[in-house]
Image (cartoon, rainbow, N blue to C red):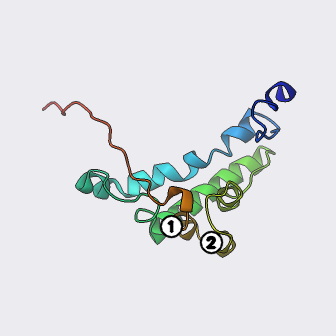
Amino acid sequence: MFELIKPIYPEIQRASSVLETALSNLNAVFHPEGMIMNAGWIQHTGGNFLFYREGFTDAVGRVTAAVDAERIAVAKALGIPAVPFIDVFYEAGLTTKAARDSGDISRACRESEPNKNHQVTLLARPPLRP
């Protein structure tokens, strides 16, 4: 299957299993804690703030690093290759080399040029019933 898809998606990379692809999902590593830890700010501003530049404080970065360490430990226990979040984020062109080399996830997010203007998008939801 890989050889059939490679011409269509040249950036695709072979993985050892579907578990490797699942455990390498960057969005699952840093969006949940970023959203949860910024819930008050999201509600207060209606999402009108820069998620990566303003929302990724040092505390959010430390929690994200802890989640990433857990992800890597699970992968290791299963014998699945796993690359640290900050390295994948850098290799994807989403942060600077200096930020990657610092090991600081919050810095890597703040220095993400492709994401510099990314805001939280709030979807309309029905009002809560009493």
| Residue that label 2 marks | 99
Residue 102: percent from the left, percent from the top? 65, 75
Identify the residue shown where x is 44% and y is 54%: 118
Q: Nearer the viewer, residue 68 or 27?
A: 27
In the rendered image, the quadrant that contains the C terminus is: top left
Q: SS at mark 1?
A: helix
The crowd level at tag 2 (other Cα within 10 Å; few <14, some 14-19, many 20+) is many
Q: Which mark is residue 8?
A: none
Q: Is residue 108 left or right of residue 32?
A: right
Q: What's the amino acid at mark 1?
A: Arg
- Identify the residue at the far right of this view: 3
Q: Is residue 122 left or right of residue 6?
A: left
The residue under label 1 is: 110
Residue 57 pos. (x, y %): 44, 68
Q: Is residue 103 left or right of residue 117?
A: right
Q: Is residue 20 above or below residue 2?
A: below
Which of disc 2 and disc 1 is earlier in sequence? 2
What type is the residue that disc 2 sits on? Ala
